[in-house]
Image (cartoon, grey):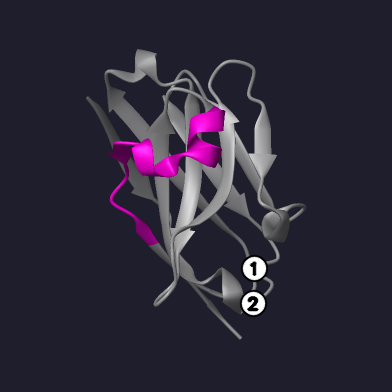
Amino acid sequence: QVQLVESGGGLVQAGGSLRLSCTASGRTFNNNGMGWFRQAPGKEREFVGTISWTGGTTFYEDSVKGRFTISRDTTKNTVYLQMNSLKPEDTAVYYCAAGPNTQTLRYNPASIKAWGQGTQVTVSS
């Protein structure tokens, strides 16, 4: 079982930046993919991006490309979501998730069992 603990959310003005962290513990060796998702009030969960533990390959949803960056520190079992040029529409609860690979995270998130507790990001206009 993988446990994921997130941190780093908060309130920021439009145009500002935040960095979220997600630290994994437990049986991490079966999970080569890490992903970030978000859910705004009244909306469905939305894919944000993924990164592979091996190689660090990243993929982003179109609306965050060029503004968000996912990175990882394998020595700390931690992935980061650096969010720049934030917009009010980025307001949501952000979740990290661990999966066997990045394709599963992107195309079949319903099958993912390891999720963080979520952290609130609020962007004021």
The verdict on residue 116 being magenta is: yes
SS label for mark 2: loop
Q: Mark 1 points at which residue?
A: 86
How busy is the neighbourhood of tag 1: few (under 14 within 10 Å), some, or many (20 plus)? many
Determine the image quadrant of residue 13.
bottom right
Horizontal side of residue 73 vs 110, given as left or right: right
Instruction: Report how far apart the C-alphas of labels 2 and 1 lie in the structure.
Output: 5 Å
Q: Could you tell me which quadrant the N terminus lies in? A: top left
Residue 91: horizontal and vertical position, in percent?
51, 72
Q: Could you tell me which quadrant the C terminus lies in? A: bottom right
Residue 76: horizontal and vertical position, in percent?
42, 24
The reply to whether the C-beta atoms of the residues labelled 2 and 1 are less than 8 Å apart is yes
Disc sitting over residue 33 in the figure: none
Stretch of the chain drawn in magenta: 102-119
Q: Mark 2 points at which residue?
A: 14
Seen at 37% across and 58% down, the residue is 119
Seen at 44% across and 31% down, the residue is 78
Q: Along the line of sight, which residue is nearer the eye, 50 or 25?
A: 50
Seen at 60% across and 49% down, the residue is 82
Query: Does residue 10 appear in this view?
Result: no
Q: Along the line of sight, which residue is nearer the eye, 77 or 32?
A: 32
How busy is the neighbourhood of tag 2: few (under 14 within 10 Å), some, or many (20 plus)? some
